[in-house]
Amino acid sequence: MDMTSYRKEIDEIDQQLVELLVKRMKVSENIGRYKEENNLPVFDAQREREKLNTLAALAGEDYENVTDTIYPLIFDVSRSLQFRILKGTSPIYEKITKAIETTDKQLPSHPMVACQGVEGAYSQLACQRIFPGANILYFNSFDAVFSAVEQGLCKFGILPIENSSAGSVNRVYDLMSKHDFYIFRSCRVKVDHCLLANEGVRIEDIREIYSHEQAISQCSEFLKTFKNVKIVPCENTAMAAKFVQESGRRDVAALSSLRCAELYGLECISESVQNNAGNFTRFICITKELNILPGADRSSLMLVLPNRRGALYRILSRFNALNINLLKLESRPLPNSDFEFMFYFDIETSIYSDEFLHVFDDIESAVAKMKYLGSYTELV
């Protein structure tokens, strides 16, 4: 046989496979209707395990890995079809549909918003992009911002979650699993770091440079040019500028924004010293109650997966089966656990699509724990 003959044989087999797959999916839909009528759960873990073992035995030792790879995806697609028949089985589904109906369609004009840092912080810029007329309360730490929202002291909180150069803000991700909140909106802020010092200070006078650890990372190439200079991390870039001004010292400087130079009467020694000109930080706006504005097309989830082979792959295959785009995947170790991880997902799909409303039904059976963090629009 030549290549043309082999390909013809493959085409004939594929035609049979597709016909059988369609037939299988139709039977799966009938099973879904039966489960709906008889109040039976969609997911039957024992049945799936037994089925995979049977299929592996049929395939034989040489090809059992093929059935182990292909059939979990077929099961996922079949289950998705059944969940579309059993509408609204998940409590999260009900919470989301209610929030879509009841959320005020207008942004509040003068909300109380919690930000980490002091006047001039990048979180303030993010806040003013989302709420131009916000009343801002400043807090020393990210944890305090979460707590202020959780306890009702502020309606909203603004937190940095990732930077285009330095990556994720790990401390915020760790706190996300600890606190109860929802993401209301997100935005990206252009970040330009400048070296600021008190009036008359020369670059050769500097012995200490203060800034947030993310800013230090974002300006690493510039900082390498300083010899015998101590780099000191602090809570916030604006706090660094404020410290330099209040200290009155002529041997210290801060990596901060030009806005902070104006606010605190500092001089800019070097402008735009970050590694990349296109340096953006993404901020999230959190709130205690679930609110979903019209047009939301981005959602965030936190999942703890069972500690077994292929667990993450099976979640990803579910998103694929539902035709949902994955924007971000971040893993963080769970505190007080032995090598267990929390996975953070950003997914892209309209809140009005059937795929979105049923994604929670579809993945709930495959995870040890699921936390829905909200659906929102990102300002760019």
Image (tube, grey):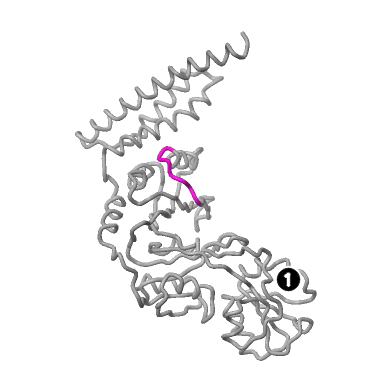
Neighbourhood count class around disc 1 (C-alpha, 10 Å): few under 14, some 14–19, many 20 upward = some
Which residue occupies 55% across, 63% down?
169
Residue type marked 1: Leu
Q: Is residue 233 above or below residue 12?
A: below
- Please say whether residue 326 is one of the residues in the magenta stretch: yes
Q: Tell how many labels.
A: 1
- The extreme bottom residue here reads 248
Quarter occupied by residue 190: bottom right
* Residue 362 in the image, given as x and y percentages of width and height: 36, 42
Q: Quadrant of the N terminus?
A: top right
Q: Is residue 267 above or below residue 39?
A: below
- Please say whether residue 13 is one of the residues in the magenta stretch: no
**Stretch in magenta:** 321-327
Q: Is residue 231 above or below residue 379?
A: below
Residue 228 relative to residue 301: left or right: right
Residue 7 relative to residue 176: left or right: right
Residue bearing the label numbered 1: 223
- The extreme top residue here reads 1
Q: Is residue 133 above or below residue 85?
A: below
Which residue occupies 73% across, 66% down?
221
